[in-house]
Structures are given as structure tokens and as C-alpha cells.
Amino acid sequence: MQKQQANITDKIIAEISELLANEKSYQHVLSSMCTPPKDIIRTIAGLFAEINLGDPGLFPKAVEMEQDVLAELASLLNAPQGWVGTITSGGSESNLLGCWAARHWARKKKKIQKGTILLPLSAHVSFEKARDILDVKAKWIGLDEHFQMDITRVQEAITKDTFGIVGIAGTTGTGVCDNIKALSDLAEDHELFLHVDAAHGGTIFPFLSELGLSAPSFAFENPGVKSIGVDTHKMMGGLIPGGSIIFREKTYTEAIAKNISYLSDSSTQQLTVTGTRPGNSVIASWVLLKKLGREYMLERVRSCMENTAYFVHQLEQLEEIKLPFQPTINIIGFRCTSIANEELAMNLRKKGWALSIYDQWLRIVVMPHVSKETIDLFVADLKKSIQGER
Ligand code: 0PR
């Protein structure tokens, strides 16, 4: 009977493997902020699949593990005593929660019902969703020559209708960190809620100075910052879905926090949009942050930064290739002087590469799966594409 069961399992897995055979393995993926998990994380995904953090009373130890993970993240973000947070489904949910908190705070504190939030043009699309869901107004601010939200333009855009600012620590397109200190000063001066989207950069910037690289100040050491989102399913290598949001103090979660009277522990509050939440993702983050710890993250960031420098060096050898910015983290942009971006991208896609097309450049994210060998293979194909080989 057991043998029969094993045979059925093997058969189904073989069938799925065949179905997905043509899905991209990460080998040629240069467009993703996700990366294949370590074996221990894969094992955890299966072993703890039934743990649901949406019903904390059933899984009190897992709830403690969530708090442990949040405490590790809060410490990376220099969160002051009194912070509160939650694990989310990723950057989009964290951004929605940050904007939701800001809207509520503005209604209460500033009596602004339907105000405006200022965002950099580099903001992730999740903020457009947040604007629509929350029914607020958004004003997009242009970038300066460093691809940062232009501080002068932010200053000029602030009116009595403005209730919040969003700064990005590691933009999706360039990896640049906005000038959070200047945004924080403006937020303090004009009494605005500043949310920082550190979905990608939040697990990179805290390690750069130890690696001898320049590290911007992006977190709670800036007093205007009221909430920060950091993903666990990006650079950290946690399970999908996994993100987080940390608030400076509990008051900012007033609108979001919900007690659910019929749950097995009705004293705990949900701070998320989602109800049922995957415990295995939180346990995976717990292993990465508590068991593998700082050494693991440092090594991960170090090797991605080293490979980014190697990648940049290889690209700079090609006369037709121009880099619109020098990478500050593991995100590279490039364009070709002789071929339009779309055509070049299509050409490379035909050769099996996945990379992202932006208005003025093609984007590569140098995640842990992007090895030097992969970079060499890609650069060889890029050379062929430039030389006109289809
Ligand atoms: N904030 C920033 C700065 C982001 O870059 C992203 C996603 C988000 C928020 C939203 O995060 P979630 O996707 O977790 O909700 N950035 C990547 C992007 O849009 C997400 C991604 C990941 C896309 C893997 C493709 C892919 O293969 O480019």
C-alpha cells in the first residue's frame, strides 16, 4: 500500500516536472529579484506547510518565531523601542499597509480626508495599486541626475493637501536609494508621514559598510521615517511569499489592526491585508536570520556585489555598451549605441535570456544565482547580438 502510494507520488511529480520542463530555470534569468532557495529552505517549505499565522492561537510558537524574525529585521533598520510589525506577502502588501497607515494618520492628525502622497517616478507599481485601493491622490516627483527623488521638486510639491511621502531604498529600476535623510527632514518640517520602500534594498544596504562599500542612511535613524517595508523573498532568499513592514510605533497601526473574536486566541491582532498566512515562509526566514545569521547575509551581499562589479567590468569592455548609472547595489542598467533597447532585448530573449526593458536601458539584477560563468555566457551572447547575429 505504502509502495503504491510512493509510486503515485513519483508519477505525479514526474508529470508536473514534465509540464514545467520549459519554464525558465533561474540559470538564464537576469530579470528577477527572486532566486532559488537553499535546500534547507525547500525542506522547510514542505515540512511546515500547514502552519497558518492567520490563526495565531493554534500556532503560538510560530507566532513567537514571527516576532523573532521581525526583531532581526527591526534591528537591521535601527528601529527604536516600541516598534511593531508584521510579516506580509511581499513588497506590494507592505506598501499598501504603509500608505494605509499614512492615510489614517492624516485623517486623524491633520484632518485631511483625501489628500495627496508624493512618490518618486521610480516608485514600484504597487503604489499605483495602493492609491486606487485607498482612494487617495498621488503626485509623482521627477528624479535628479543621480536617479534620486528630486528634493527641490518634493519641497515645491508640498501643499496643505499633502499627507505623506514615499522614499525608495533600492529602486526596482536602478537600485538607487533616495535621499531619505532629506525626505525625513521635509517630513518633520511639514508634519508628513514618510514610508520607505526597502523591499529589495532593506537586506542589502545594512551590510555594505562592513564590506567597505558606501552605505546610505535609509532607516529609522531618520526621525521622519514612520514605516519601512523589507522583503524576505528577495535578497534574503526566503520562501515566496514573504515581506515585512515595521512601524516606528504602535499608534501608526490603529487603522490596520483588527481583532478577530472567533479565533482561538482573540487577543491577537491581525496587521495584514491577508488573513491566512504561510507559516513556512516565516520559519524559513527565522532559519536564515537566526540560525545562519549575519554571516550568511554578509556573504550573500558580498558575492552579489563582487559579481556586479565583474559584470560591469565585462560590459565596459564593449565599445557600443553604455551604462546610464554606476550600480550602487546589484542592479545594472545598460544600453547599446547601435541597437534599440527593445530589439536588443528581443534578440537576447531569443537566445534564452530573461532581462527587463526600461525606457532608457535594459536592467539586470545580479542575484545569487547569477554566477561569473553565467555572466561570461551572457556577455558572449551580447557581443554576438551587437555584431548583428540573430
Ligand atoms: N518595491 C520594490 C522596490 C520592488 O522592486 C518590488 C518588486 C516591490 C516593491 C513589490 O514586491 P512584491 O513583488 O513582493 O509585491 N520588484 C520586482 C519587480 O517588479 C518583483 C519581481 C520579482 C519581478 C521577480 C519579477 C520577478 O521575476 O521587478
Image: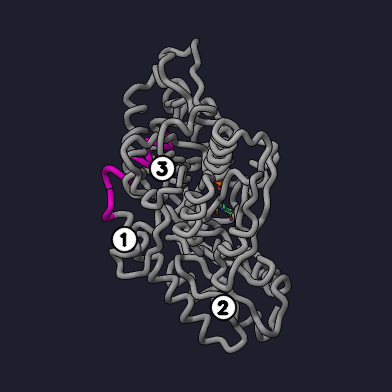
Q: Is 53 left or right of 32, judged from the image as shown?
A: left
Name which residue type carries label 2. Answer: Leu
Decide which of 140, 332 is in the foreground and name it.
140
Say above or below: 384 vs 360. Answer: below
Q: Of helix, strand and loop, which one carries label 3?
A: helix
Q: Is 171 left or right of 48, judged from the image as shown?
A: right
Name which residue type carries label 3. Answer: Arg
Residue 298 place in picture, x, y as percent? 31, 59
In primary-sequence order, the first of circles 3 and 2 is: 3
CB-based contact (under 8 Å), mark 1 and mark 3: no
Task: Decide if residue 305 is in sight here.
Answer: yes
Magenta-highlighted residues: 279-295
Name which residue type carries label 1. Answer: Glu
Residue furthest to the top in view is 262
Badge 3 density bin: few <14, some 14–19, many ≥20, Cα 10 Å = some
Badge 2 density bin: few <14, some 14–19, many ≥20, Cα 10 Å = some
